[in-house]
Image: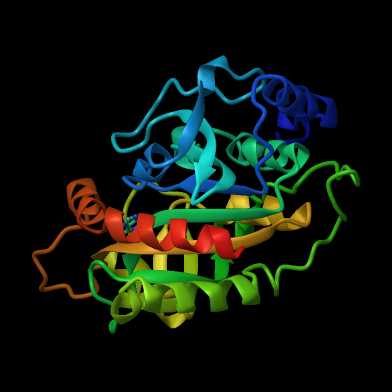
Amino acid sequence: SSSTSQCSYEEYKETADWLLARTEQRPKVAIICGSGLGGLADLLDDKTTFPYEDIPGFPTTASTVPGHAGQLVFGRLQGRDCVCMQGRFHFYEGYSMHKVTYPVRVFYLLGVKTVIVTNAAGGLNGSYEVGDIMLIKDHINMPGFAGQNPLCGHNDVRFGERFPCMSDAYDHELRALVKQTAEEQGCGSFLQEGVYCMLAGPTYETIAECKLLQKLGADCVGMSTVPEVVVARHCGLRVLGLSLVTNKVVTDYDSVEKANHEEVLRTTQRRTQDVQRLVSHLIPKI
Ligand code: HPA
């Protein structure tokens, strides 16, 4: 149950102190890289890399998904100290919501102020094309509706308040910076802005589920990001979210298309440079 799987403040602190003793970098920005988007971490200068299994308290990565490496990379991007999660923990891998979000509280204790989350997602909005980048303006926390919110359980006020606001989760100023940077970097023609809906996965959606999510006002669907954002907002971190539309969801019973991980990875390969350019040129403006 959530009450037994929770981690104590001291556990997060021990992890943060362990990292602080092993790098001189003091990042103000953390980046959580989505499926196939971890190449961003390779761009960092003066890297210090910690495989997740070496970091005390970090969830262990017995089950990794192709396209997800498992290491924390400190370094500089466009001259700014950053810490990058190359590979994230997914709920569908069997991690509790507390484990999925463990790194976010460690970032907070490291002194991070802003979290950038990226993901691969299915496009629900009919006007979106495969390869579009969606700036997340809001989310629908479906697992939360079903009782899987990472903030369930005891609330430690050293992280944040019992009932945090989520109506301002995706920072307005950062969204304006993304739009400006996308224009400058030639990404303006495929930048969208919309609502990300998280489902637990690992199954892709049925046709009826896709139609339902469209009616609910979701523009993209995926299996990550929302838990990390909830925990980041709880402890007062600013959040920027980007979804890469890797496929269009199937909403037609006559369609022969099928959602599949290979298409997701093909699209991330095609667009990974654009996402990297967008994020790295944004960093000095934060
Ligand atoms: N559905 C859910 N998650 C996804 C999808 C999808 O179509 N594409 C990439 N991640």
Image-quadrant location for residue 42: top left
Position of the C terminus, as image quadrant, is bottom right
Q: Between residues 78 and 142, which one lies in front from this camera angle?
A: 78
Vertical side of 78 occupied by 95: above or below: above
At 62% from the left and 69% from the top, the residue drawn is 170
Position of the N terminus, as image quadrant, is top right
Vertical side of 172 occupied by 273: above or below: above
Tell me how many marks there are. 0
Vertical side of 254 occupied by 114: above or below: above
Left or right, residue 257 beside residue 46 = left
At 59% from the left and 70% from the top, the residue drawn is 174
Could you tell me residue 265's position as x and y percent? 23, 48
Q: Between residues 79 and 1, which one lies in front from this camera angle?
A: 79
Left or right, residue 127 beside residue 230 = left
For ligand 1, the image quadrant comes to bottom left
Residue 191 visible, this angle: yes
Q: Between residues 237 and 212, which one lies in front from this camera angle?
A: 237
Vertical side of 121 occupied by 178: above or below: below
At 37% from the left and 67% from the top, the residue drawn is 209
